[in-house]
Amino acid sequence: MRIEIVACDIDEETPAKSYAITIDGETHELDLCRTHARPIEELITAAKGEAIQPPTSPPMQSAPPSPPERTTAVGTEEEPAARRRGGRRPRITSMAEVEAAKAAYRAQD
């Protein structure tokens, strides 16, 4: 037995309907939930000359809500640590310098 569940391509909500839209000979296949399919359904309804039903769910948000401001307890405010800028860069060594260092190390033994 095989069960197939269709989820919205945008927000992965279920259930979703499959739509095939052709624009200038290019076909786009989409699986859309009720919220995201609403504009397409409205266009189809308007093209048929039927009345458009008012939405039953709240409209989609264009941007996600911003996170709440972070607050600290009274008296626990600390100055942020000084940010380190730059730092120590790696030493660039030529092969001749590496070989000379190895020779000097061997000479110490």
Image (tube, rainbow, N blue to C red):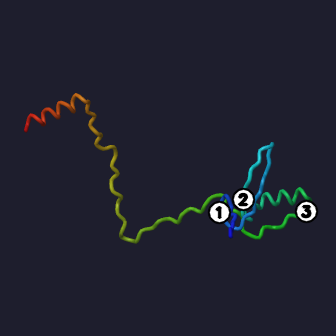
Indicate the position of residue 28 as horizontal and vertical percent values. 74, 50
The quadrant of the image that shows the N terminus is bottom right
User: Mark on residue 12?
Assistant: 1
Rendered image quadrant of residue 71:
bottom left
Q: CA distance from mark 2 to mark 1?
A: 9 Å
Kind of element beneath mark 3: loop
User: Is 91 or 107 nearer to us in this picture?
Assistant: 107
Q: CA distance from mark 2 to mark 3?
A: 24 Å
User: Mark on residue 50?
Assistant: 3
Instruction: Give the residue type that dot 1 points to.
Output: Glu
Against 77, residue 109 (above or below) is above
User: Mark on residue 31?
Assistant: 2
Could you tell me which residue is drawn at 56 percent across and 62 percent down? 66
Q: Residues within 10 Å of mark 1 (few under 14, many from 20)?
A: few
Instruction: Give the residue type that dot 3 points to.
Output: Glu
Q: Residue furthest top?
A: 96
Indicate the position of residue 21 as horizontal and vertical percent values. 79, 51
